Amino acid sequence: MASAVLELLSHDRSQTFTDPTPSDALVSCYNIDTSADPGGLALTSAELAPLLGDTGALGVKNCRIASMLALASIASQQPHRLKGNPLIENRIWVNCFDQNESIKKEARKTWRVVNGTEEDANSDGPLPAPSKMYAVPLIPLLSHSDSSIANAAAAAFAHAVGMHQDTAEKSVVRLCSTFIDSYPTSSTSKADASGSGSVPPSSSSPLHPVPAAAPKKSKVKRIDTGLPKKPAKKKTVGGTSLSKLTATTKPKKKVVGGKSISSRTVKPKIPQAKERTFDKELLESQFQTGVSTKKIEERDDETKVSTRLGIVRSIMALSDRSANIVLDLPVLKVTVAFLMTYGLADGSEAVRNCARDASREIVAAYGASDEAIEFLLPHFESILSTGQPDVSYLGSLSKEKAPKDVSASDRRKEGVVVALGSVALHLSGEENEKKIDETIDMLLDALKTPSEDVQSSVAACLSKLMKKGRTQDRIEAILTSLINDCLGGDKLATRRGAAYGISAVVKGSGIATLKKYEIVKQLEDACVNGPSSAKEGALFAIELLCDRLALLFEPYVIVLLPSLLKAFSDSSDHVRMAASHTAGLIMSKLSAHGVKLVMPAVLTAFDDPNWRTKQASIHMLGSMSHCAPKQLATSLPRIVPQLTEAFTESHCAPKQLATSLPRIVPKLTEAFTDTHPRVKASAEEALDEISKVIRNPEIASISPILLKALIDPATGTLNGLETLIETEFLHAIDAPSLALIVPVLHRGLRDRAATTKRYGALIAGNICTMIHDPRDFVPYLSTLLPDLKSVLLDPIPDVRSTAAKALGSLSRGLGEDTFPELRPWLIETLQAEGGSSVERSGAAQGLTEVLIAGGAGLVEDVMLEEILPLKSHPKPGTREGVLWVLTFMPASLGQGFASLIDPSLPALLSGLADEVESVRDVALRAGRVLVRSQGKPHIDKILPPLENGLSDDDYRIRVASLTLLGDLLGMLGGTKVVKGDADTQDDVRAAERAQAQIALVLGSDTRKRLLSRLYLTRSDTAAVVRQISVQVWKTVVSVTPRTLREILPVLVGQIVDALASGHPEQTEVAGRCLGDIVGKLGDAVLPEIMPVLQAALSSGDEHTRRGVCVGLSEIINCSSKDQISKYLAILVKSVQDALCDEDNGVREMAALCFQGLYGLVGSRALDEVVPVLLSSMESEDEDEKVRAVNGLTGILSIRSRELLPYLIPRLMTKPITKSHADALGQIAAVTGSTLHMHFSTIIPGLISELASFYGREVDGEEKPREDAIRECSRAVCGSVDEIGVNWLISEAASSCGSDKESLRKESCVMLQVIVEERENDFYEQLPIILRELLYRLNDDSTEVLKANHQALGALSKHVPAEELVKHIDFIRNLIASMVSDARRRKGGVGDGEFLMPGFNIQKGLEPLLPIYQRGILYGNASIRETSAAGLGELIALTSTKFLAPLLIKMTGPLLRVVGDRNPSEVKIAIIQTLGLILTKGGPALRAFVPQFQTTFVKALSDPSRRVRVEAIKALALLMPISTRLDPLIKELVTGSLGKGAASSTETAGAVTIQTATLEALSVVLRHGGEKARLPASIPSALNAGTELMTNEDEGVRESAAKVIGAACGLLGVDVTSDFIADAILNDSGRDSGESRHCKAHCIHRILASPVGTELDEATHAELLALTKALLIDDNRKVREGACVAIGAVLGRASRISECLSEAESSLLKAMDLQEPMEIHQAVAKGLSVAVRLNPDVLAGEKGLSLLDASLKLAMSGVQRVQYSFNDFLWLALDVQSGEGGLESYLEIASYENSRTMKTLFTKVLVRMKGVSDDEII
């Protein structure tokens, strides 16, 4: 058993065993129970042997530690058993000096326990000394194959010598003798020297020994290992057992009670131990080396070499100062002589090297005394000169084998130099300075020896002498010589030795030497610019400096690294080889920080165009395999993926590279796309280098397969993963192994094949259990974790499951703190709205495994605080994610999920009712998992929610609850839910068994309750629920009738509860179920059910009564006529009571019962019920009346056509009583489909009855009757079906035109009620309603107007404006027709102002305003025009008093829409309406002035002339309320000059816009110019007009004249006089026709303005003269303007007669019939201007000639001329004031003219409305 445990401990897998550990198990194997018999059996040698052999104290680390623990335990129980045993002592003592601290610590504890010092077991004090027999058992271990044991044995030997100083000489001699015994004979040496049969040089670690053939006749063998052997009577040849060595004999059995008493761990037949004695000679014979005394030639072999190497290593350990050894001079002489004679001359290079180092250390440690120096110096110098040692110093040692050949002498000379250097260390004083210098020179010469070992030893010695004597003064010369040899030496040995020398000198002199003598710079220059030999030498020096200085040289490595990389591309093979060695050594010496510094330079080398440099960078990465383990583990995660990608440059997309190598991918992408084959080859070599440092034997054995997977991932990845899975790991995976495994996993996880991804995830999850330190895996998480996340979301469930378990395993092994982003990412993926159901499933499974890895506490916290609260999240994806977690959590957590069942069930149930199908599917899946995993143990928690779910409102929850309940019952009953009919015998038997098992588990009461619930669901409203319910029922019930009889009481109770629940669906289900029971059981169930229902109907609440009616209806429908006849009396009474119930729902249900009853028994049902109800209606008891009406209402709801002809006349009997009105209202509510056929009686009767209340006071008794009739009217209007709406409106509208005011009012009210009670089924009748209501706007009665206003308000409120706007033309035409009729009818206002009565009440216009606003804002062009114009008409019909509150509501929409792209007609209508609003509103609209102004000015640029004209008119209306005119004047002035944005002269129609702007400017100046505040505003307008006097366009000139006239009127007489003088009277003789034309118009406009009266007579005379001259101008347009201007001159003349006499001839000439029509029109306009300015200007005879001429033209045949002179004559004769002007004319005129004038006066002039001043002035 102990051997098996030790075998387990030899593997790393032993670390996975805990409680107990393998070490505890091993200790337990040797526990001895001595409580019963303290003198019981002791452990035998065979039982102790496993602890002492190669699997125990000489085994691997774990075995050695466990063996020490076991030995300590044995020693504490049987101290006498181990004390004094040399073999046990030897094993413990050796382990006390092992290099491993754990082994050393446990061994030293055990050593103290064995030696009886348990109290000091944990102290660090000195160890108890071993026995003096230490040498014999230690010597064989010096050559042990395990170097750690061999080194520990050497240290143990040295410390034992130090504790027993008296044995020093004897021990040294024994060591030397053993060496000589294993030394080959001289002839062999000669053969070796000649080259035949020589042993190859050993590596740095000793060769494994090969067992030597023992002498045939020898009876003594090497030490017995203590392994168990079968007992034999004969003696074994050449050895004996451990029991024989201790002289133990076979003990007798001690019998107690007939039974043998033995140890628990000792076999019964093993003899007990007696008191031990020692046979010294026999003991010593066991440790003899077996040297034959026969002198024969002995050949060397590896075993002998290993023995000699161990001896020399032990001798070197004697120099350890911690051993406290004191070697006196005789011993020193023997030791040194031995080393000189045999060690340095040994044929094995490894032995020689070790002997050389030993001689150096021995001399350095013990050669400081004068006596020693006196011995050493001559001795060494003699050997240096002759090569032969003085063998006399060997003393008793054999001298026969001392080699004396030439090669041995040469070897001694090489080695003695090092010893001589150690002697020099002890020299001091000036007298020895020369000797020191000579020694240093000798050492420097020895550096040229073509042996690297010699050079290394010399360098080690040389560095210690750098501060001795006068060496510091020679440093520069020494370094110069060494550098020259290193860089310029002709031999390799010279260059290499010089490099050693440089490193030794720098080491001994200090690091400052490098900078002081610029050594690094010289080496760098040689690497870059030197010849091949210099480059090689420089690389040697760099390598050895790094080796010797270690971390001190690290800063210079960064400087030299670019040169080193360049050396890889050198043409010389020797240089490239040196660069490779140098790189390897540098990497082996770098610290973790140094690796970080080196990596950027290595990566920079990827940019070099030379392929060799790229290759060098890969070599450097491969060289990192020489790093220390810690640094290697840190670097490999970055190195191996890069090297891996080097093989796949043609197969790896850039995206893959970016994903794999996020930190260095740019460099690798460039490097590995190189086509040179050596780049790949170098990467392969680098990977091979890394694979060599793998310590795990299993990975080492499959490393070729892993390398193949890295080199060729397409074909090797799957094979590599399969190999990893098939491999049984007995040892921990080390960091280099991970470096090879992780890239393969990375490739596998990204592969397309599902198998490959699954294998990769499986290995990634299990890898934490196979590594010694989980932290070694952390650097790889950044590579693998994204891959695992991707695989976790794979479409294949098996792959997702494996990835989830891998994440859980990693989280468990590394701790969740290592993955701070993992859990948030999983939860985020669960909630991702854009993710698929597959992704959420994978995230949920991964989250489940991660949480379980964190422990039950974490699971509960996260579920309750983070996951379950998301069950009501608005996003369906998040809700689905929660349910996916609940799908995986119960099965994974097992019974640990019990505490989460209650919090999880609400999430499941809400998911089952989710509106998204995918969420419901996942919820059902989660529920099934919960039932399967937790159903049986936690049925008490799961069953109640499922029962409640059967009656849930959502049918989906009912379906899911039934499905889960079926699974649960099937699991309890040991069956499955059947599919199909399930009528076979097997199905019936299975149902019987299930029914019995369920009854046993649930109990009788629970079973009946559950089956009753289940049977109820068979009548569910949803077909899918019924289907599943039947399947579940057949699964657990074998015979339905029998089971129904068993559960009938419980079922009926549940039915009644459901009927009384008030829930419509549950009530319906219960009714169906009741009918189903009646159908199945028939008369057997009715006697039990009917009393229950009748009692519930009489005593239950409204929900119960309603449910009872449903039940009665189902009973009636499911029963036969004969069955009903038996219980008819009970049924009729119940139905009648229900029909009269005060609850409407009960009555509705009762009506259905009556319908069913009527269908079965016919008119018998009516005969039984209706007469009783009709008689009850006439009862004085109000309650009875109400109940009767309720009953009739219920019957009418289903049989109205038969009963209404009898009821309506009775109810409409005048006067209509309150009770009749209430009854009619209630009847109307249920007879809407047939009531309209009686509207000819009902509607007129209701209107007439309501009209009877008009005009009289309604007392206390009449008021309730009126209210009842009005409510009845409302009920009738609201209850009628759509088919009767037109009948209703026709009847209501028929009374609107009645002569009786009361009927008109009530008709309007009825129309209002119709609009309020109906929804949208009367829209086709809107024209009728609008016509009647609009006609009432002109009603004489105020009450009618109010009722009509309310009706229109209701219409506007309840009918959407977009619907009403469709009738806008109809409304406008109707109003226009009404206005026309009102004007023209008798007593009308004619053309005077007419105000619509319906608009001139409080808010009279408000009902129609939304219609017009809707049309203006959202209608098409035609509707907008009509709406705007119609709104203007409404404004004109409304007085300012009632219009003011609505102005703002009307103005805003108009201003907002006028700026849109509307046709000109729409804009005209809107601007005209705005003008009306301004006229009516006045100052109330002051807040809108800026908007008005902007709108009108913008309209001046419109292409339509009418729009521009209306805008100008609107600006004139705006001026009275405008306050800031200066900006407006400035804008108009700018536009008039053609400088505005909208007035560009390049734009089409610019002249017309310019004209309109000038017109607007003149209007603004004329109507509001006095409000201008800035001094420059009016003059700027005058200047603009002056500038445009010569414009080419006639209209512009005329408009400019208007501006000039208005400006002059504002600026005063002085400015006007100056303007007249400068611009009008300054005739230079070169005036153009345009200028003369404008002057004429300017004269007209200036004189027509107020300033015209202030001009002096001189100016007036000059203007008259100019005008007369213009009257005879050749230009017709000039003459036209002059004709108008002369009228203004006459009108402003102070001396009228003189002025008239001067102008008369010119005017009469212009009035000649031969003149053009335009001249005549201009003369008429001029005369009109004169009369308007001065009414008396033509009074009397002075104007008779002009009047006669005008009369003549007024009677001419030209219509336009006639109209113009008619206007003049209307003004001249002052027709507006009467006939006085006519009489004055008739008195002085001729007869003919008088008659003509009189006729014209009576037929034309009197009929004229007037003449506008705007058309004249």
Image: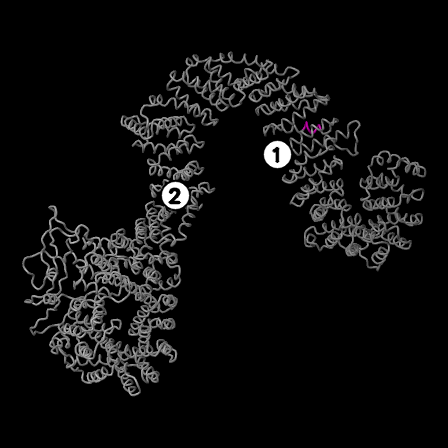
Question: In the picture provided, is 680 more to the left or to the right than 334?
Answer: right
Q: Residue at x 11, y 64 (%)?
A: 278
Q: Position of residue 1109 (x, y in %)?
A: 47, 20
Quarter holding residue 166 = bottom left
In reply to whether residue 920 is colored magenta, the answer given is no
**Distance Cα–Cα, label 1 vs label 2:** 52 Å
Please indicate whether residue 510 sits to the left or right of residue 1153 in the image. left
SS category of the residue bearing label 2: helix
Amino acid of disc 2: Val
Relative vertical location of residue 1418 with respect to residue 1578 in this rendering, above or below: above
**Element on which disc 1 rests:** loop
* Residue picked out by circle 2: 885
Amino acid under label 1? Pro
Question: Up-down: is 577 above or below 978?
Answer: below
Q: How is the image coloured?
A: one colour
Front in this rendered view, residue 134 or 1183: 134
Of 1457 and 727, nearer the camera is 727
Mark 2 neighbour class, 10 Å CA radius: few under 14, some 14 to 19, many 20 or more = many
The answer to whether residue 951 is seen in the rendering is yes
How crowded pointer 1 is (Cα within 10 Å; few <14, some 14-19, many 20+) is rated as: some
Which secondary structure dominates the residues rendered in magenta?
helix
Q: Please state the extent of the stretch shown in magenta in the rendering.
A: 1331-1336
Would you identify the image quadrant in which residue 1401 lies? top right
Whole-percent x, y for residue 1190 in the image: 55, 19
Q: How many marks?
A: 2
Kindly indicate the quadrant of the structure image that contains residue 1193. top right
The answer to whether residue 603 shows anywhere in this view is no
- Residue 1213, x across and y down, in percent: 64, 15
Reading the image, the residue beneath label 1 is 1360
Q: Nearer the viewer, residue 1291 or 1354?
A: 1354
Query: Depth-wise, is mark 1 or mark 2 nearer the camera?
Result: 2
